[in-house]
C-alpha cells in the first residue's frame, strides 16, 4: 500500500463536508491530486476531476461523492485499533481515500482512468455535482464503464433500485366536530390507503442473479384545519423503492393500482407523482464488472438503495457499486470502516486498473 488508508480516512473525516459545504474537502483532494505528475486535474465548482491520458483503448471512471449527511455527534474521527469511526467514514470517505490512493500510485494503468470527486449526492438530485460537470464539461464523464465507491463491504452491489415519492390525497367536507355527521372526514378516509400500504407484499425480482427487494412506506401525513373542524383535505406521502425491471412510469402505475380501490376520484381524491429517480440495471455482463466480481471473491448482490449508478446508466455508461464500509452503517451514529475492508477494496481495484480486467 502506498498509504495508511485508515489514517487517510481519519484525515478526510476531520475535514467537515456536509452537503453544500464541501469546499475544504475539495481543496484538499485537488491539492493531493495536483501533485501527481501523470494526472490532469480540473476543478469545476467544488467538484474535482483527475484523468490519466496514456492512450489506452478503454477508459474506466471511478466516482465518489465528497459530501456527508449532517453530523450526529460523530464529526471527529476516532481510530481504535484497525477501525476508524466517524461521520462519513463508510459513506463514503473510505471510498474517497481508496480513490485518492489509487490516483497517486497507479502510474501506468492498463486502461485510462478518470477519477471524479463530486458534491451534493446526499441531498436533492438537482444539486448533484455530476449535473454541474455534465453541464460545463460533459466530455469528462465519457467512459466505457463506471464504478461508484459507495459502501458495499467490498462486494459488488449491482445496479440500483429506483425511487418514487407519491402523494395520495383524500377529499372531505368541513363540519363542526360537535356535528361530524354533517361532514366527511378526509383524515379518516386515509385509513384504507394506510391499511393497503402496511399490508404491501413486496416484489423480489431476480435480475442477473441478483434479488431486488422492493418496498413501499408511508413517510409523511398531513391534514386538519383546526381543533374543532372536521377536515376536508388530507394527504399521505408514500416512498416506493422499485427494482430495475420496471421504469418510473410502470412503478408509479403499480402504486396507483394498489391504492385506487381505497379512493373516490369523483369526490376529488388523487394520486400524484411528486419526485422520482430512475433505477439502473445490474450490467454484470460487462467484462470489467465480471472481472471485478471475480477479483472480489464474493458473489454480487443487488443494490437496494438508489445511487448515481443511475446517472451513468442513463448516459449510456454501464456502472456498478463497489467500495469499503458496511452500507447498513451509513448515516448512523455507529458509522465506521475497517482497515481490512479498505485494503481489500484498494487491492481489487488496483489489480483491475493494473491488468485492465
Image: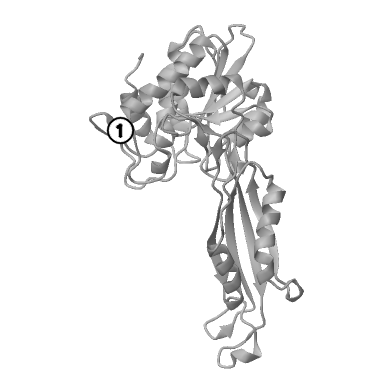
- Residue located farthest toward the right when viewing the structure as drawn: 266
Place of residue 26 in the rendered image (x, y in percent of width and height, measured from the top left): 47, 28
Can the viewer see residue 42?
no
Residue that appears at 65% across and 58% down: 255
Above or below: residue 7 compared with residue 310: above
Q: Is residue 103 left or right of residue 197?
A: left
Q: Is residue 97 left or right of residue 109?
A: left
Above or below: residue 14 compared with residue 224: above
Place of residue 114 in the rendered image (x, y in percent of width and height, measured from the top left): 56, 19
Q: Is residue 323 left or right of residue 334?
A: right
Give the quarter of the figure containing the C terminus.
Answer: top right
Above or below: residue 346 compared with residue 245: above
- Residue located farthest toward the left when viewing the structure as drawn: 81
Can the viewer see residue 215?
yes
Above or below: residue 271 compared with residue 160: below
Q: Residues within 10 Å of mark 1 (few under 14, many from 20)?
A: many
User: Which residue lies under the disc numbered 1?
Assistant: 84
Place of residue 18 in the rendered image (x, y in percent of width and height, measured from the top left): 44, 40
Amino acid at each position: 500500500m502506498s498509504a495508511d488508508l485508515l489514517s487517510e480516512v481519519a484525515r478526510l473525516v476531520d475535514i467537515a463536508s456536509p452537503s453544500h459545504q464541501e469546499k475544504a474537502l475539495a481543496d484538499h483532494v485537488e491539492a493531493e491530486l495536483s501533485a501527481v505528475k501523470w494526472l490532469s486535474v480540473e476543478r469545476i465548482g467544488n467538484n474535482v476531476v483527475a484523468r490519466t491520458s496514456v492512450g489506452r483503448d478503454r477508459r474506466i471512471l471511478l466516482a465518489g461523492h465528497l459530501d456527508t449527511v449532517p453530523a450526529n455527534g460523530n464529526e471527529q474521527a476516532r481510530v481504535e485499533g484497525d477501525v476508524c469511526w466517524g461521520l462519513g467514514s463508510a459513506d463514503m470517505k473510505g471510498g474517497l481515500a481508496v480513490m485518492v490512493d489509487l490516483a497517486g500510485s497507479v502510474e501506468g494503468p492498463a486502461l485510462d482512468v478518470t477519477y471524479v470527486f463530486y458534491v451534493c449526492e446526499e441531498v436533492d438530485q438537482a444539486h448533484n455535482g455530476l449535473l454541474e460537470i455534465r453541464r460545463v464539461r460533459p466530455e469528462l464523464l465519457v467512459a466505457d464503464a463506471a464504478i461508484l465507491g459507495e459502501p458495499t463491504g467490498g462486494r459488488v452491489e449491482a445496479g440500483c433500485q429506483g425511487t418514487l415519492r407519491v402523494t395520495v390525497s383524500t377529499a372531505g367536507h368541513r363540519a363542526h366536530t360537535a356535528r361530524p355527521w354533517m361532514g366527511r372526514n378526509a383524515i379518516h378516509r386515509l385509513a384504507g390507503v394506510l391499511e393497503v400500504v402496511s399490508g404491501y407484499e413486496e416484489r423480489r425480482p431476480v435480475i442477473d442473479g441478483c434479488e431486488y427487494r422492493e418496498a413501499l412506506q408511508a413517510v409523511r401525513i398531513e391534514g386538519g384545519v383546526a381543533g374543532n373542524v372536521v377536515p376536508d383535505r388530507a394527504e399521505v406521502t408514500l416512498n416506493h423503492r422499485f427494482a430495475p425491471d420496471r421504469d418510473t412510469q410502470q412503478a408509479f402505475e403499480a402504486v396507483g393500482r394498489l391504492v385506487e380501490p381505497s379512493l373516490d376520484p369523483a369526490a376529488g381524491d388523487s394520486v400524484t407523482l411528486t419526485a422520482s429517480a430512475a433505477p439502473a440495471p445490474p450490467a454484470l455482463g460487462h467484462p470489467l464488472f465480471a472481472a471485478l466480481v471475480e477479483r472480489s471473491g464474493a458473489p454480487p448482490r443487488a443494490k437496494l438503495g438508489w445511487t448515481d449508478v443511475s446517472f451513468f446508466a442513463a448516459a449510456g455508461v454501464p456502472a456498478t457499486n463497489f467500495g469499503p464500509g458496511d452500507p447498513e452503517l451509513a448515516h448512523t451514529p455507529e458509522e465506521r470502516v475497517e482497515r481490512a475492508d479498505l485494503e481489500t477494496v484498494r487491492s481489487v481495484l488496483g489489480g483491475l486498473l493494473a491488468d485492465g480486467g
